Amino acid sequence: MRILCLNANTTEFVTETVAGEMRATLGEAAEIVPETAGFGPAVIRTRLDHVVAGHAVVERAAAHAGAVDGIMLAVSFDTALDALRAALPIPVVGMTEASLAMARMLGGRIGYLSMGADVTPLYRDTLGAYDLDRDMAGWRALEAPEAYRPGDKSALDAALGEAAAGLAAEGADVVVLVGAVLAGAARRVQPGAPVPLVDGGRAGALMIRAMVALGAPPRRVGSFAGAAGGGLSGVSPALGRLGLGLAGRDTR
């Protein structure tokens, strides 16, 4: 199977971080196709960033629509997830959605670790759609600029481990590492953690593999039936075709 690892921001390092963890998780079971947004924010930090990134991510998804078996959104805000699910006849998984689903199967109370207090409101918007407050044990937002660049991650991992232990002491049964840039961190930090850790790179990879294997046919009724719109002007040809309900062919 071919899985598109689709990043909604323009930072190639984030794309490769998630794609690397997907490859480590799935091995030869899937070919991972990394793709980065062609315009928009380098890192999504505001609601305006998120809206612009939504345009960028659907455009790149449209360009690959006929050439992959599924899409994993390599963006922790699950940007344009519902729109892509409605428009495409292939499975689309959000990495944060997948993390939360997996965490709920591992424990009762969930702790959250994210990067940057300034983006916590936007994370809460995202997780609110998944009933965040139902089982949240606590939240820690770390300031760790080194997470966003290549190099030694020992200081980051130590901070993540300390914060995870703190959340466990507050009652968390499992901790979700929120942030595309943290893909792979759960694997590194888990040996010293007192509770299970989940990150979106691994959880998303496992979920999209399962969804592709499920082989569910396209929906023909309901709110995700993928009805064609009235057409889009001023967009790329691939996105224009997607807007007309012509998804599923190679539009590159």
Image (tube, grey):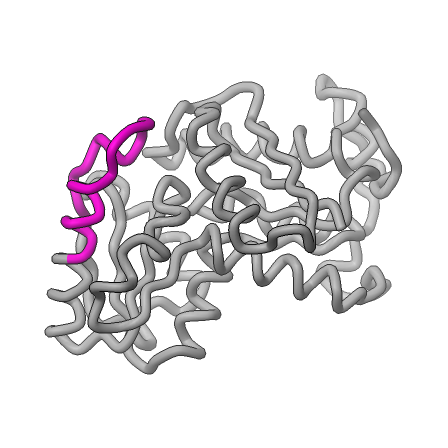
The stretch of residues the image draws in magenta is: 141-161
* Residue at figure coordinates x 79%, y 41% from the top left: 229
Magenta span contains residue 156 = yes
Q: Could you tell whether 65 is left or right of 161 in the image? A: right
* Residue at figure coordinates x 83%, y 44% from the top left: 228
Does any portion of residue 245 appear in the rendered image?
no
Q: Position of residue 221 (x, y in %)?
A: 82, 66
Above/below status of 83 relative to 225 = above
Above/below status of 37 relative to 209 = above
In the foreground, 115 or 244:
115
* Residue at figure coordinates x 48%, y 42% from the top left: 18
Quadrant for residue 13, please give it: top left
* Residue at figure coordinates x 27%, y 41% from the top left: 119
Tell me how many marks there are.
0
In the foreground, 1 or 78:
1
Above/below status of 28 relative to 249 = below
Q: Position of residue 121 (x, y in %)?
A: 28, 48
Q: Position of residue 214 (x, y in %)?
A: 75, 68
Quadrant for residue 146, please give it: top left
Q: Position of residue 74 (x, y in %)?
A: 51, 42
Q: Could you tell whether 92 is left or right of 133 in the image? A: right
Q: Could you tell whether 215 is left or right of 116 in the image? A: right
Quadrant, the C terminus: top right
Does any portion of residue 84 appear in the rendered image?
yes
